[in-house]
């Protein structure tokens, strides 16, 4: 048993022991204000749950936690496969949780992982959680930030250079003659999406006469893409962009379907289209989709290797930042404007 128990936490946070127990097992079912008081009490008292104490008696946990931002995307599936394959080779099991982009759920899951004393955490997060990451490391639970550039004074990180990816996408549209560029995506307060937009803006600003329009959507899904495509199709031809960059392939596929289903807008002759992610069916779309490719399988394996290194070196070790470079994969959704041949480019 830990020196501090549930009753002490309950007294400190002015709730019942049952409420503390409910918070530890089902944090999403506790009111945010109550959860915040319990979380503060746990931090102040240094409480460690019984299951973690049992793990400490029998030896270190072999469970890695992965707190994901969105588990429903094709890119996540590739990443998770890489993580699980590498974890199995090293001897870890992987527990996956989905925050759905909610900072409150992120905090609740981090509470749960800490109470269970997982061996380490792969963190794809909306919030920075810098103080929390430092505290976890002090308690022997290292964290690797996934998909965002973390301060190496805090933890290691693995990411895609999304700014470069956005720039590659829009530079390609500009190189094939597009001058009215539209970027469709969101939410733009997510670092990876903001970086893709920043890269797109850099590319447009470098070309005289080019202009950019930004359309923010609430979801990066085929349905949201179809709605955006229908909006584009309803515009007069002179008001439409001649090049569209969608911040992921699901959006791009929805846009493509909406633009082409009535034959009124030709892709790429009227509107050239670039996606992001190069998911499995991008090449099999009704018009094969030009996209930005990420090395998702190596991305996952590298994240696990970084975490394993953090575990092995213990607190006070050196942190590393790894950034993968994306590639432009050219297909028919853009090549028809110039006759350029499909292929892969790092331009």
Image (cartoon, rainbow, N blue to C red):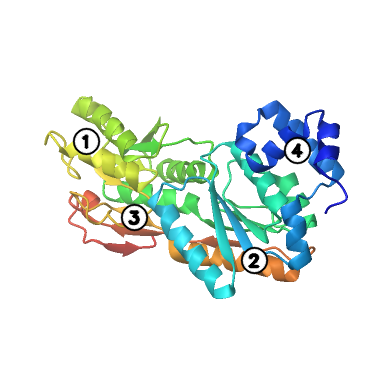
Q: Residues within 10 Å of mark 3 (few under 14, many from 20)?
A: many
**Earlier sequence position, callout 3 versus callout 1:** 1
Up the image or down, 127 lies above or below 304; here it is: above
Give x and y (percent) for residue 90: 58, 74
Residue tagged 2: 62
Which residue is farthest left? 263
Q: Marks 3 and 2: in contact by CB < 8 Å?
A: no
**Earlier sequence position, callout 3 versus callout 4:** 4
In this rendering, the label closer to the viewer, 2 or 3: 2
Q: Is residue 229 left or right of residue 295?
A: left
Q: Is residue 212 left or right of residue 300?
A: left
Up the image or down, 293 lies above or below 16; here it is: below
For the residue pair 320 and 104, the one nearer the viewer reads as 104
User: Which quadrant of the structure image shows residue 314?
Assistant: bottom right
- How far apart, in angstroms, are the residues tagged by discs 2 and 3? 31 Å
Give x and y (percent) for residue 140: 76, 60
């Amino acid at each position: 048993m830990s020196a501090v128990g549930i009753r002490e936490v309950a007294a400190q946070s002015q709730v019942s022991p049952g409420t503390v127990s409910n918070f530890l097992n089902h944090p999403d079912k506790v009111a945010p204000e109550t959860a915040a008081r319990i979380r503060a009490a746990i931090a102040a008292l240094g409480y460690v749950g019984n299951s973690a104490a049992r793990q400490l008696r029998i030896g270190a946990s072999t469970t890695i936690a992965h707190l994901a931002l969105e588990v429903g995307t094709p890119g996540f599936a590739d990443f998770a496969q890489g993580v699980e394959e590498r974890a199995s080779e090293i001897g870890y099991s992987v527990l996956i949780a989905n925050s759905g982009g909610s900072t409150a759920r992120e905090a609740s899951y981090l509470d749960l992982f800490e109470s269970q004393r997982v061996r380490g955490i792969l963190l794809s997060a909306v919030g920075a959680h810098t103080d929390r990451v430092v505290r976890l490391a002090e308690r022997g639970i290292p964290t690797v930030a996934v998909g965002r550039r973390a301060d190496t004074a805090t933890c290691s990180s693995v990411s895609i250079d999304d700014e470069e990816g956005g720039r590659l996408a829009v530079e390609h549209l500009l190189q094939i003659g597009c001058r009215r560029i539209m970027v469709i995506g969101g939410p733009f307060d997510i670092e990876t999406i903001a970086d893709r937009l920043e890269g797109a803006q850099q590319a447009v600003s470098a070309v005289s006469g080019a202009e950019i329009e930004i359309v923010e959507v609430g979801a990066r899904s085929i349905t949201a893409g179809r709605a955006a495509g229908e909006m584009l199709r309803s515009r007069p031809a002179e008001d439409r962009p001649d090049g569209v960059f969608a911040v992921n392939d699901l959006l791009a596929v929805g846009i493509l379907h909406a633009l082409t289903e009535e034959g009124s807008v030709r892709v790429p002759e009227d509107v050239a289209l670039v996606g992001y992610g190069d998911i499995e069916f991008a090449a099999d779309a009704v018009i094969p989709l030009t996209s930005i490719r990420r090395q998702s399988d190596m991305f996952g394996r590298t994240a696990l290797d970084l975490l394993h290194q953090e575990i092995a070196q213990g607190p006070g070790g050196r942190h590393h930042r790894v950034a993968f470079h994306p590639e432009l994969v050219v297909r028919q959704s853009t090549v028809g404007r110039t006759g350029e041949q499909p292929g892969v480019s790092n331009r």
